Amino acid sequence: MNRKEVFEQVSDMEEQIGQLYQQLGDLKTHLSELLEENHRLAHENHHLRQRLDQSIEETAGRDEQGKTTEQRTVDNIGEGYDNLARLYEEGFHICNVHFGSPRQNEDCLFCLSFLNKTKD
Ligand SMILES: [Zn+2]
């Protein structure tokens, strides 16, 4: 190996080292971008998890505070009363004595007492 060849080889190595150094710099940039994104996603994930927990709590809370089973039953009874009252208005018995038969434009005491009882 003569001096020229040695010099050329050292030159080549210098160039390769330069390229490697540049690649290393690129990788470092890329790595810091990834770390930043990872940090951002972890942060976002944390927030979304909190929002989800909050939303689950709110939903559960609404069921407890808003429409309890008891209140829903009361609603159903109210609706049932309205239906029976409408049926009576339309001229049918809603009392257990003549239930479903036509009233023939007469008030029925059984029906009326039933309506009042249900209303209270
Ligand atoms: Zn009746």
Image (tube, rainbow, N blue to C red):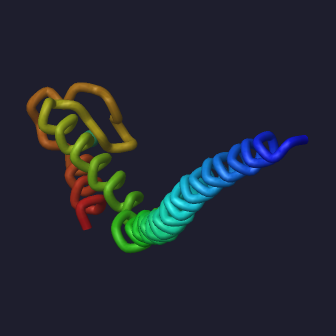
Return the residue nearer the eye: 101 or 59: 59
Q: Which of the pair 6/42 is nearer the observer? A: 6
* Location of residue 7 in the rendering, given as x and y in whole percent from the top left corner: 74, 48
Residue 83, percent across and down?
A: 25, 40
Is residue 92 visible in the rendered structure shown here? yes
User: Could you tell whether 60 is left or right of 99 in the image?
Assistant: right
Relative depth, front residue between 31 and 101: 31
Q: Residue at x 12, y 37 (%)?
A: 89
The quarter in which the C terminus is drawn is bottom left
User: What residue is drawn where x is 49% and y is 65%?
Assistant: 36
Q: Nearer the viewer, residue 90 or 43?
A: 43
Q: How many marks?
A: 0
Residue 90 place in picture, x, y as percent: 14, 30
Residue 47 spot, x, y in % from top left = 44, 69
Outermost residue to the left: 105
Instruction: Give left or right: position of 17 versus 69.
Output: right
Is 106 positioned to the left or the right of 13 in the image?
left
Assign ligand 1 to one image quadrant: top left
Please say if 113 is above or below 8.
Answer: below
Q: Quadrant of the N terminus?
A: top right
Q: Residue at horizontal 15%, vertical 30%?
A: 91
Q: Residue at x 62, y 48 (%)?
A: 19
Residue 38 lies in quadrant: bottom right
